[in-house]
Structures are given as structure tokens and as C-alpha cells.
Amino acid sequence: MVNLESEITYLPGVGPKRAKVLGDELGIKTFADLLMTFPYKYIDRSKVYRIDEVNTEMPYVQILGRILSFETFEMGPRKERVVAHFTDGTHLMDLTWFNGGKYARTHYKIGEQYIVFGKPTAFNGRINVVHPDIDPSSELQVSGMGMQPYYTLTEKMKKAGFTSRSLERLIKNLLALLDNKLPETLPDSMTQRLNLASRDEALRNIHFPESAKTLEKARVRLKFEELFYVQLNIVRYASDNRRKYRGYIFQSIGKTFNGFYYHRLPFPLTGAQKRVIREIWNDMKSGRQMNRLLQGDVGSGKTLVALMSMLIAIDNGYQACIMAPTEILAEQHLKTIADFLGDMPVRVELLTGIVKGKKRNSILEDLAVGKIDILVGTHAVIEDNVRFARLGMAVVDEQHRFGVAQRAKLWQKSTNPPHVLVMTATPIPRTLAMTLYGDLDVSVIDELPPGRKPVMTQHVYDAQLPQLYESIRRQIRMGRQAYIVFPLIEESEHIDLKNLEDGYETLRQAFPEFKMSKVHGKIKPKEKEEEMQRFASGETQILVATTVIEVGVNVPNASVMVILDAQRFGLSQLHQLRGRVGRGADQSYCILVTGHQLSADTRKRIDIMCDTNDGFRIAEADLKLRGPGDLEGTQQSGMAFDLKIADIARDGQLVQMARDEAQRIIDTDPTMQHPDNAIFVRRLYELRKTNVNWSAIS
Ligand code: ADP
Ligand code: MG
């Protein structure tokens, strides 16, 4: 029997040199790794089309024919388009290269027979395939006439002589060696009940599908398996924690909460806020530690929910803390909370990196003896020397900047871990939340406070800036204020800062009659705070800024958000920025400014922004456009995961199914002692050995 853990160098046809390339480029170190390197596409080699039957509705076609001639078109400096005129005897078509045309021109021979594959489009009244896959017609024989797998190659692999075809041969060799069945990783009872292919069937068919149907079944099986083990790991982790840690029991709601609710609350809670506070309260009295994710669009009133939850902790003799990702936000929270509480006998203090010396020491002392009720701060709050007398509740604002490890640190702040409420204004699609924050229960505020008018979003080009300035002027004359945001990313910080400075000058000349504030990441926190304060108090009418205002700033009188170079912002950033306006009773506007040249992706982002204010729709679209690995925060969250075949955005149903199965197993056998569940324990153990990313959540 072949050992799948054998080093790849021992596979016939590999050897040390190629083994090194496979390892370095694709991480293929063992037979098993090779087997788990899946094709990115297949070509149905069973059908060769005639050019005269091809139409642009077809997703892709395969045509056998010859190149008649090449033609090269200049497209500006050092850019050319190369076209090959191609025929199969029935008709003419074109093959086009916008990149790599030179290679095509020298590599493919006129008159030789090729098999061409690609998406048919129409150009100049002729069928055209852009960047086709081309193989010598002899390659048709390799995999017979079925579906031919295509494997990803890196440039280095190509240089080392690898082709998709050579990988295909290696895998074919390997599968031939493994004539015995590949070991199962799911129990038969499960595969049968869910009608899943066996692992052996699935792995053979994912590489060499017998038909489109068996391929589909193979994919479903492999995706499910992948998602299932992620979910099993998460559900088991959450259940272990639940068993290990008891939660503080908050018996009652008392005079702090009630005093606030009946005497201080300036407006009625929205239905959603009430529901969420009830969910939190249920957790707090349940005896188990709360770990709850609170999702709510910008402006939905999460801070108030957090505050009222903290008041419950105070009523029960505990302290609470709230952590924000930046100093500005922490200070803003302090102010919001202090304003809400007014003269109530609740002591609130701020602890950030800039609180130093005597002040800091006295805060630390008072905290340790329980004289402070609510500590508002940044990461400074979780430093080791910060000790609470009785920390009962911790709120983490803007989850994506706080990693799992940091959350875990909170737990060491008191005998039992405090109840934890994680708030995020970046709506996370359900299937992603289930995977990224699968150990958290989820509450959603899906209702904005009454009287808010949806922000109107428009896209304008640079050339229309003068008209835009006029509309800003009109708004300001009506007593409103405006944000003007410049992009700033670290990689091009110098240029971006210069753009901001230049832009600021231009704006000053454009608006000589108004006062402006300017903030960005490079100015001192104190100065930043003063500028923000000047804007918040209405002393300045325009705030020129980078994304430092991205989260949390609350100036209800601001009704215009102008985002320059909007193409450089991601969807969730754009949505966050837009959330800065529309907080008062006035109609607000968000203007996305770009140049004329837009990529297809930018166009989509802008369209979605103009189309909807619904953060969840935007998050879904974002997930589809970028893929989960790319989403802001998945890296820092420490739960980054590397899915080979499943796609959280597209395979939502399978994520749910995997979750349900995992939950059922853990519900009935929390420690997986039952012999039927041994297979899961074994597999989790194997995966832990091979997949570094999982270590973060276990
Ligand atoms: P989030 O943190 O969810 O973005 P905030 O908590 O900052 O939202 O709330 C945005 C604004 O709405 C604040 O000015 C807050 O005082 C106000 N607000 C919160 N809840 C309500 C409510 N139920 N009715 C009216 N205004 C509310
Ligand atoms: Mg907020």
C-alpha cells in the first residue's frame, strides 16, 4: 500500500529537482499534497465545435484548426495587440492577445494544427477568442476524450518545464499507484444520509471526471468535507470554552439601568435595540459566559446598546470596559457615554496610550480597587498591568481590528472571563460570520433610528469638480458641514500626503469664505483631537481628511461626504465613510469622485454604492468581488483560513449544512468520545498537523 505521506520526490516522474519546484511553488511536499492540488478548470474534450456553429452565448468552446497569419496593432507606447487569424475550414475567427502577444507570435506556428480553447466573443463581425488556451492537437490524446483538468502553474514552474499536462500525468501516475481505495474521512452513515460521494470517488473525479455530473458530485463532497471540518473545529472550540468557563450571573436589573432608562434616555429605543438588549440580558443571567457579536450598520445605535449592557454589569456590582481601535474613537466613546449618563453616579474614565504619568497611575489604582465603573480605552486596556477589581463585562468596538488572541487576553482580567460583546459596523455576511466568528453568538440591529433619511449617493468625474464645489457651497450656506476625504495608503504614503496637502490648498482657494480643518494619520493626536473638535463644534465647515475618520466619528450636522479617488477605496471602506453622514434629520449626500478610466471592478463597486445603502448587501457584494481571504480583518483576526475548494461566498448552503452537522455531533457528544466519532477526532488531529492556520482557533 502506498503511503500518502511519502515525499513527493519518490513519485515516479518527479525526482529531487522537480520536487523542489513543486514544494516551493505550490507547497506540494507529499503525495497527499499533490492529490489535493485541484484543477482550476476543465475542458470538455468530448466536443470540438466548428467555427460556423459557435456563438457568443457559449461559455467556452474548443476548436481544431490552423493559424493563417498574425497581425500586430500598436496600442500606445510599448503596448500592442496581436491577432491570429484562425480557421478550421468552415469559417474564419480571430485569436487576440493584449498581453503576451509577442510570445504567441513566436511560439505558435502558422499552418500547424492546434486545439484552441476559450470564451467566444464577437469583434468586427467575427468570432474572437481573447487570450485563448492553445495546445498542439496531439495533446487531445492525453486524457482521452473526457474532461481535461487544468492546473495552476507559476512562472517559475513554467520555466522549470512544468505544464498543466505534466502535472496531469503525475496525478494520473499517483492515482494508478493508489489502486486501493483512498481512506475515508467522513463516516459512511454521514455520506449516505447526505448523499455525498465517497472520498475515493471524489478525489478521482475531481482530477479526471467521468462526466459533468460526477464532477459536480465530487466538488460538493470535497467542499462539504472542507467546510465541515472547519465548522467542527469551531463548534468544538466554543463548546469546550463553554464547559471550561462559567459566566458571571447577573441576577437583576437595578437602579443604574432603570435610572438611565427612565430618566436619562433621550429617545425611545428602536425595536431592534430592545431585542438585542434582551438577548444580551438573557446571556448574562444564564450562567454561561456571553460571547456575542453585535452587528449593526453604521449609525444603528450600537454604542447605546453597549452602554446599557454595561449598566447591567454595574447594577450587579461589576465593572465594565469598552475598547475602541483608535484614540479618537475611544475619546469619542468617552464623550458619548458621559453625555448619555449626565449626572448619574457612574464613574467613567479614559485609558489610552496618551494617558500617562500621575493620571495613569491614579486610574490604575482606582480601577484595581473598584472605584471606576466603566473604563473606556484602546488596546491599552488589555495591557498586563491594567487590573480590574471585578471586570464583569467587556465591549470590543470594531471587531476587525481586534484579534482572537486579544479577545482571549480579556479573559485573564478576572477570575471568570467577563461577558464579551463584540461590535462591528462592517456587516459580515452570515456564512462568513459563521466561519470567522463561528464561536460567537450573533445579534443584529437591522433597523435605523427613526427619522433618518437615506443618504443619496452619486458618482461624478473629476471634470465635474467645479459644479460639485458649487453644491457643497450651497449646503454649507444652509448651515451644513462637509467631509472631503483623500485616500491614504501606507505603501504610497508620501505621495498620498503630498496629494492631500496640495488638495487642501486647492480647496482653500475654492472655498475662501469657509473655515477648514485637516486631519490625517501623521499629525499629533492632540492636534488631531483639536481639529476634530473644531469641526464637531461647527467652528469649521469643511473637514479635509484621510480615512482616520473612517470609523465612529459622529457629527450629525455634516451632510456631505465627498470621497476623492473613490476607486482606491474598498467597498466596506466606502460604506463606512458614507456612514459619517445621514446622522441628522437633513438629507445627506455622498459623492464618489473618480477619473474617467474605470476598471470593471471599480465600476461595480461604484454602482453598488449608488444603488443601495444596505450594509449587508454591500458586504455580500464585497465578499463576491474580493473573496473572503481578502476581506479587511480576516488576516488580523487570526482566523484566516485557507480553503482549497469551498468558497464561503458562493457555497453558503454548504456552509450551513456543515455547521448543522458539526453542531449536531457536538450537541450529542461534546467531547467526541463515542466510537462513531473517532473518525472526526482523528481527522481533526491530522488537519491540525498540516494546516497552520487552524492553530489560531484551537
Ligand atoms: P453606531 O455605533 O451603531 O454606528 P451610534 O451608537 O454612534 O451608532 O448611534 C448613532 C447616533 O444615533 C447617535 O447620535 C445616537 O445617539 C443616535 N441614536 C442611537 N439610538 C437611537 C434611537 N433609538 N433613536 C434615536 N437616535 C438614536
Ligand atoms: Mg459606533
Image (cartoon, rainbow, N blue to C red):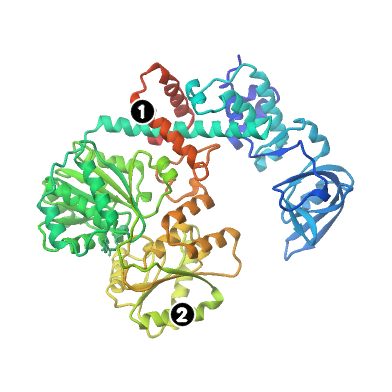
Position of residue 688 measured from the top left corner of the image (x, y, whole percent): 44, 28
Q: Secondary structure at mark 1?
A: helix
Q: Secondary structure at mark 2?
A: helix
Residue under the image location 84 percent in, 51 percent down: 86
Image quarter (top left, top right, bottom left or bottom right) of the N terminus: top right
Farthest-out residue, bottom: 513
Position of residue 318 measured from the top left corner of the image (x, y, whole percent): 14, 45
Residue under the image location 34 percent in, 24 percent down: 671
Label placed on residue 469: 2
Q: Do the residues under discs 1 and 2 have CB atoms within 8 angstroms?
A: no
Whichever of labels 1 and 2 marks the residue nearer the N terminus, that label is 2
Which amino acid type is shown beneath numbered disc 1? Ile
Q: Is residue 2 above or below residue 297?
A: above
Q: Which residue is mark 1?
A: 666
Q: Is residue 232 left or right of residue 382?
A: right
Residue 272 visible in this rendered orientation of the protein: yes
Q: Is residue 93 left or right of residue 594?
A: right
Which amino acid type is shown beneath numbered disc 2? Tyr
Position of residue 170 measured from the top left corner of the image (x, y, whole percent): 69, 27
Position of residue 20 measured from the top left corner of the image (x, y, whole percent): 62, 31
Label 1 lies in ligand 1 vicinity (Cβ under 8 Å):
no
Callout count: 2
